[in-house]
Image (tube, rainbow, N blue to C red):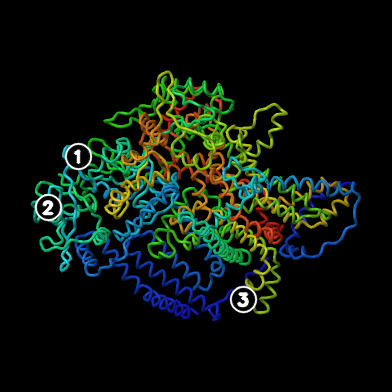
Amino acid sequence: MTSAPNRRTLNDWGGAFWFRLFAIAVLDALAIYAILVLIGTGATLMLASLIIGTAFINWVYLWPRTMALRWITPGLIFMSIFVVIPIFYTVYVSLTNQRTGNLTSKEQTITFWEAKTYVDPDAEGQLFDLFVYTDDATGDFRFLLANEDGAYFFGEPRLRTEPPIEDGIEDQGTFAEGEEVPPPEFNGFRLMSKREVFSLANNVDFKDLVIDTPDGEIVILGLSQGRVVLASQRYVYDAASDTLTDTVENRVCSPGEDTATKGNFVCDDGEVLIPGWVAFIGADNYTRVATNPLIREAFFKVFLWNVVFALLTVVFTFAMGLVLAITLHHYRMKGLRFYRSLFIIPYAIPAFLSILVWRGLLNPAFGVINATLAPLYDLLGMDPIRWLSDPTWAKVAILLVNLWLGFPYMFLLATGALQSIPDDIQEAARTDGASGMRVFWKITFPLLMVALAPLLIGSFAFNFNNFNLIYLLTGGGPPVLGASVPVGHTDILISFTFNLASASGRGNNFGLAAAITMFIFLIVLVISAFSFRFTKRLEEIYGSL
Amino acid sequence: MAASDEQLEGRVEAAAKTGGQRGMAFAWRRAKQPKPKYPPQSPKMWLKTVGWRHLIAIAAAIFAIYPVLYIVSSSLSAQDNLAGASLIPKDFSLDSYREFFRPERPNITPFTTWLRNSWIISLVAASLNVALAAMAAYAFSRFRFKGRRTGLLALLLVQIFPQFLAFVAILLIMINIGNVFPAIGLDTLAGLTLVYLGGAIGFNTFLIKGFMDSVPESLDESARVDGAGVGTIFWRIILPLARPALAVIFVISFINLFGEFLLARTLLSSTDNFTLAVGLQLFTNADYGAKWGLLSASVVIAAGPIVLTFLVAQRAIVSGLTGGAVKG
Amino acid sequence: MRSRFIALVGLVLALALVAAACSSSDTGEENTTTTEATTTTTEAVTTTTAAPTTTTEAEALPPLVIWADEKRAPVVEAIAPAFTEATGVEVQVTLVDFGDMKDEVTTKGPAGEGPDIFIGAHDWVGELADNGAISPIDLGGRESEFTETGLDALKWGGQQYGLPYVTEAVALYYNTDLVPEAPATMAELTAACDATTVDNCLGVPGGNDGGDAYHHYPFLSVHGGYIFGFDPATGFDVEDIGLGTDEAIAGIQVLEDLVTNGYVASTNYDDAKNLFMGGTEAFWLTGPWELGALEDQSDVNWSVTTLPTVDGDVMRPFVGVQGFYLSAFSENTAVAEEFLLNYVATPETMMALFEADPRGSAYLATIDAISDDPINATFALSASTGQFMPNVPEMGAVWGPVGDNFLALRNGDIDAATAAANMAEQVATVIAEG
């Protein structure tokens, strides 16, 4: 074939070179800045990918022998970040227990449990109003708590996470009747204005503050109230043994060992503390997909319809597009632009809006479609069609709507392909005595298929996972009756997965959903590879690589 | 004597082989030539050659625009309710449109801001998509390098992965980016635009690559002899010839981005940053039947310009969409 | 050649370092101060408190982020200026679809992008609390200002999560032109239907193409059916599923009879609404959130009554509560709580919320103010006869199967016994296996 273009070397010191150099320098500067910031935050994974990515870009644009990569890299960067990483993320999630109750990191889980206070249920405590005082010279501050009767405590708060002190109360007593509460000055401290208090509260969450008294803690409830109550931190985390100690029930809780409890603290007495954190559980989700009766039972039914749906969608849209293209492809045909304009309108409207409109159109009682068909129903003496609630008709409706959404694309493809088939081949075949139909099936159609097969396979792969259409039009319904799992007649694998993941026994189960996603990916992969193999076109494209 | 199947198949193969040399990139230019005039036909003849074609075309046209007419008519009707909507507006009124553009709309549903955001994001992202895809396509079309085949296959592979959990991952990535560079982080138009660039190379690259493949390499060759570098060849020769493919990728990206709402909904959180797709989706979710008029006016306003663009650029779109694929 | 290349790399690095130094000299410093401020040590507290005292104008505070849906967001936004005025804290109201709220909070919250406050339904409380996504709220002795149902619904594990503001349940709208007198029993209702000429007599959302467990619950419960067994002391028992019981079947049978005799047509939510608003439906079973639409968009003369009794048994609707939740991922829960207690839990705000979206209030002062109106009083009465919508996370496994089987029954595909058996089996399987 062609020889590769001459590789350019550093001998080119043109303007483009300097531009490249400058761009790389700016990029590196930003990267170095980002690295400096990230070192502080401890986002190691992010840091690593940033360094590798920057090194890669420098290599590509500075090393002389990377001609092709220089052209691909800009697009590749974005694809890596926003398409490839999410794929790896899905793989990662499929190996974890990420689900309702296990959504946060271990640190967040420990913070959650350590923040739990125990209040004796019999001692409700007494409510006090909270006032904040400060010393402008030192910047120290104090809390004044006063109740309706004039009783008050004055003291220095501490963070709940810090060790308690013997007595944080510096002054306590009762305000005399008629005395101004709160006083503008108190024990040498100045009363802070509301704005100042809020500003302070933005730096320290008041709910994390307590004041120690000999009898217990004063719990701060908000910015204007506190409750004097005997409260204590219930769970204490010990980093050395990686355990939570429950100070109320005197038990020790340690991270679970088996796959069911991994990611949660399990206490001596067997209680599993929810929430837990996201933990690595290996291939457990995959084995569950394979063995779970819920999935197994409905899988084949859903899978079958999924294939039929994707296949028929491609066949119908392509057939309609092709027929229209052929119809318009005639040298005497007038009004081409007009027709073509009308045909491509559905393509130009955002699909989610079209689907909403179609829902309205297909409404059995008020929809325009049934209203239009009403005379026909009368004639045949049949009931109006329940478009979206009858198992068969719902499938018809889905295919119909998808035909509407998809045929313009196929029409455009077919039109272009038809135009590019040299007329002389068909003419020659005709002069050889082949009939019009025969010329079409033996010459035109194979040539079209050679050209369009990869795009048709692409369309199949897209529709195989066309979640939006199913979700917005029927939501997978109508339901399959008597199934032991909730599954609908028009559910495809991805919508079925979505339902399983979002309405499982206890809320969401992302880990399981990710594992099913991997299975779906494999299926699409196999089907696509299989069909590619059967198209000559594949070798046309790749055979000459 | 009728041609045998073997003969016909031979022709197919021959056409497939020669197709490349014909240079489909030039097809759209050829089409610009004036149409020859044909002698008039008898009505019977007319029916036989083009009459039935018009019948089919009209039927398909009705199918295509039926829902569209319904929406347009609802948007022009004084009736604001889905139940009252009909194909011909009962009482004509522009109220829905006035409501859309009413300047003192509650700042929780600023339609015009959403519309502007959608246009900005879609225009910028679609342009960059085209640029990135064209560059990558150039490399795949003109360079022979190790891993080229693998690269092309990988592009395809990545495209068919179900993006089911992708939005969670993208959210996490954007949060991290935003921590370092707030200007392109979460809840920014720039950030969303960057995310949209993730889909730049993929099927787009394939379409453009196919198109570029049909530009004869002899053109590059002669330019090189004249001393043009790789960049010059790209700018001066390949890009101008690939214009139809670029146009169509641009338009298709634009439409897809304009209607995209899953990612936008995840990444944008302030009302003022919403795109129209996100805003309308929120707006319609709450009881859409009752706001049918305003909703349909929004659809018309949103989709109208796109439809017009499509209509104006349709010839380029047709040749661009298929020029590459039909290389043969 | 090689040495030139190395020189080149060196040049780029030098340029990059210079640029990086420029960019980080102004922003890097800022960064260190903020991290210092957020490390919650007493030291940081004392240093930062000095700031507002020396300079009267405080530094820009992070805004209070509130997520609300389309109906509620304007009201929350309306009370924001007063709060900002008094406290200097900006309020940022973000529009989030009610249906997406729970998932958005659980995905964005742990990443630090969630709200401080959000508005949600009470049946999320179990899942949200189990996810550690919400914080308990101490109403500070103001419990007496709310209905007991409202408070109880938002309790989980013995703690109060969220500030209730809506307690609502469905009742029976009727067209006063078609039905002169409100029926008290199901027999009176069917008799009224026989007396009218309309095709669709009783509109119950949940047929056609949209399953709806919520609107069908009064039928399930009328003779004693239930979803999960409830004990006031221990809460809901998800092992005790009451969907397949004889009582549940008897209740569903009531619906089946209405369907087979043509009193209840197969209508989804929008159809039932449109028919009633168009004046061609005598009764419509739904909640107070449609009052606004009826007043604004319909010419029909209508009124509301409580659900009819069946053989002396009361139809018990689901009682739904909505409230303001505090996100556990919020960095300033105290400020958020202040906002809720002193700016939301006021008669004015509660009234404004009611007027924006006329659902039954959970705030006693508002209930007093609105119960002079017989319509509001009827809805309140209906809610008082209702039953709690379970707030356990397992409800996620209930809505689909129950709604689906009611849908099939409404469409005439299965009978009451089959529907009940299917529901019970499917819910049990999903809870066990999901």
Kindly report the distance in space between the C-alpha atoms of the residues bearing marks 1 and 2: 35 Å
CB-based contact (under 8 Å), mark 1 and mark 2: no
**In this figure, which residue is indicated by the disc labeled 2?**
A153
Q: Is residue B226 above or below residue C420?
A: below
Q: Quadrant of residue A51?
A: bottom left
Q: Is residue A282 above or below residue A140?
A: above
CB-based contact (under 8 Å), mark 3 and mark 2: no
**In this figure, which residue is indicated by the disc labeled 3?**
B229
Answer whether residue C170 is visible to the viewer in this image: yes
B262 to the left or right of B67: left
**Residue A470 at x, y = what percent?**
56, 42
Amino acid found under the numbered disc labelled 1: Arg
> Which residue is pictured at 69% across the width and 35% down the height?
A373
> Tag 3: Cα neighbours inside 10 Å, few (<14), some, or many (≥20)?
some
Answer whether residue B198 is visible to the viewer in this image: no
C324 to the left or right of C215: left
Q: Are marks 1 and 2 on the same chain?
A: yes
Q: Earlier in the sequence, mark 1 or mark 2?
A: 2
> Tag 1: Cα neighbours inside 10 Å, few (<14), some, or many (≥20)?
some
Kindly report the distance in space between the C-alpha atoms of the residues bearing marks 3 and 2: 82 Å
Amino acid found under the numbered disc labelled 2: Phe
* Residue A251: numbered disc: 1
A32 to the left or right of A204: right
Quick one: SS at disc 2?
A: strand
